[in-house]
Image (cartoon, rainbow, N blue to C red):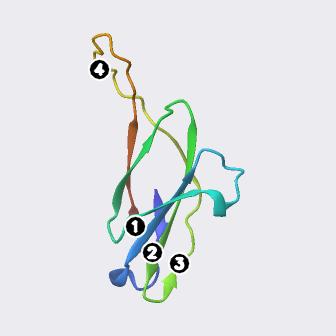
């Protein structure tokens, strides 16, 4: 995923990851995860047959920069573990790594 950083890249204090399964929802209704200054995070999803949509926004001392373009992704299902007769609940974790273009 490519995302242009705000001008003061060294002072980035927070990244927001906005995501949804319904691209038609207004952006205000997307889920938001604040990941601080880290450039990697995880998102747990329960459905590996659904497309998800993601945007990223950076913040520095001057405020928030523009949101990235929408990225569409689908989780890859994990291999099921033996359940030994117990119900199996699978939660797939998405690891998001940001790649920066200067």
Contact between labelled residues 1 and 2, with CB atoms less than 8 Å apart: yes
Q: At 57% from the left edge and 69% from the top edge, which residue is drawn?
A: 67
Tag 1: Cα neighbours inside 10 Å, few (<14), some, or many (≥20)? few
Which residue has dot 3 on it?
65
Q: Nearer the viewer, residue 94 or 100?
A: 94
How far is mark 3 from mark 2, CA to CA? 8 Å
From this view, report whether residue 20 is shown above or below residue 69: above
Q: At 30% from the left edge and 15% from the top edge, which residue is drawn?
A: 83
Which residue has dot 2 on it?
5
From this view, report whether residue 5 is shown above or below residue 96: below
Q: How many marks?
A: 4
How far is mark 2 from mark 1, CA to CA? 7 Å
Mark in front: 3 vs 4: 4
User: Which image quadrant is residue 41 in?
Assistant: bottom left
Tag 2: Cα neighbours inside 10 Å, few (<14), some, or many (≥20)? many
Which label is found at residue 81? 4
Give the mark nearest the N terminus, 2 or 1.
2
Q: Secondary structure at mark 1?
A: strand
User: Which image quadrant is residue 11 in?
Assistant: bottom left
Give the mark nearest the N terminus, 3 or 2.
2
């Amino acid at each position: 995923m490519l995302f242009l950083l705000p001008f003061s890249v060294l002072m980035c204090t927070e990244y927001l990851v906005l995501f949804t399964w319904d691209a038609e929802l207004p952006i205000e209704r997307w889920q938001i995860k604040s990941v601080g200054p880290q450039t990697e995070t995880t998102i747990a999803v329960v459905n590996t047959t659904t497309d998800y949509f993601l945007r990223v926004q950076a913040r520095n001392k001057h405020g928030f920069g523009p949101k990235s373009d929408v990225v569409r992704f689908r989780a890859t299902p994990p291999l099921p573990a033996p359940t030994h007769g117990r119900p199996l609940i699978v939660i797939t974790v998405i690891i998001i790594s940001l790649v920066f273009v200067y």
